[in-house]
Amino acid sequence: LNYIFSFMLAGDKMAQIKKDKIRQAIEGSAIDIFLEKGYLNTKMKDISEKANISVGNIYIYFNNKESLFYTVLPQSFVDAFRNYNSNIFPILTKAFFNNEQNLERYIPNHKQVGDLIANRKRLLILLRCSKGTKYENLKEEILENVIQRECSYLQKYNFADNCRTTQNYKVIRMVFYNMLNMLLDSLEGDMNEDERRNVVRFAFKYNYDGFKRLLTEYTK
């Protein structure tokens, strides 16, 4: 009896492993297709062909394309990226006004860059390929939130009025818009791991230098 029971448990475990592998294949293929075609232009057939799994089998795991999309791009991932962008610039602003000489120490470390690269496809889908989902305006929302938080934070240093004029607000928006797009550009295309790391770190360093220049300009 013990042998039969152990055999049954082993069979259940193997079946679960197979299911997990199928789910992983579906999710991995969905990420590739969403990135290639965008959410609106992606069909379940495209994902099934990429994963070499029948469309019917995909529907065993996911109710529809929408549920699959939000599985590979969960709210926790979105919130983590949104919170990072909301918090990093006030931190840099504080460091600037405290006369810290080395803002480069705030550039993501080796592990953080590695985590960013590991999730680069998800991030690109989120901000460039999500039209037709609840995230389609997320890029603009993040930009506006970052700008408003930065202006509010400057009140602590009596410089808030400097970024409320139309001219300065336009400059601030241009800077943050370019910073975000430069980061996304560094994550696109094919390159080896070392090349990717170098490009991403350059993007961060360039952006941090630009942010420091921005603070210098509108605090004169």
Image: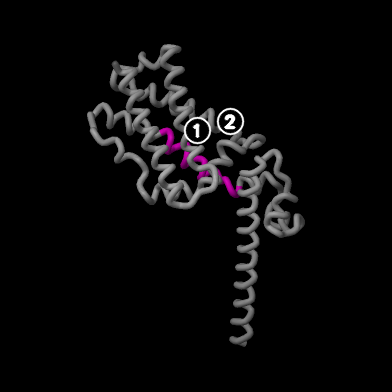
Disc 2 residue type (three-letter): Asn
Q: Is residue 149 above or below residue 118?
A: above
For the record, the magenta segment spans 71-86
Going from N to C along the chain, the mark reached first, 2 or 1, is 2
Q: Position of residue 174 (x, y in %)?
A: 46, 23
Q: Is residue 110 above or below residue 1?
A: above
Label 2 Cα neighbours within 10 Å, binned few <14 / some 14-19 / many ≥20 = some
**Residue on which disc 2 sits:** 137
Quadrant for the N terminus in the image: bottom right
Magenta stretch encompasses residue 212: no
What's the residue at 43%, 25% (across, down)?
A: 175
Applied colour scheme: one colour
Provide the secondary structure element on which disc 2 rests: loop
Q: Is residue 162 above or below residue 194?
A: above
Provide the secondary structure element on which disc 1 rests: helix
- Residue 7 image-quadrant placement: bottom right
**Residue on which disc 1 sits:** 181
Q: Position of residue 178 (x, y in %)?
A: 47, 28
Q: Is residue 88 left or right of residue 144?
A: left
What's the residue at 36%, 15% (across, down)?
A: 162
Q: Position of residue 21 (x, y in %)?
A: 62, 63
In the image, 192 versus 181, the foreground residue is: 192
Disc 1 residue type (three-letter): Asn
Q: Is residue 61 left or right of residue 213?
A: right
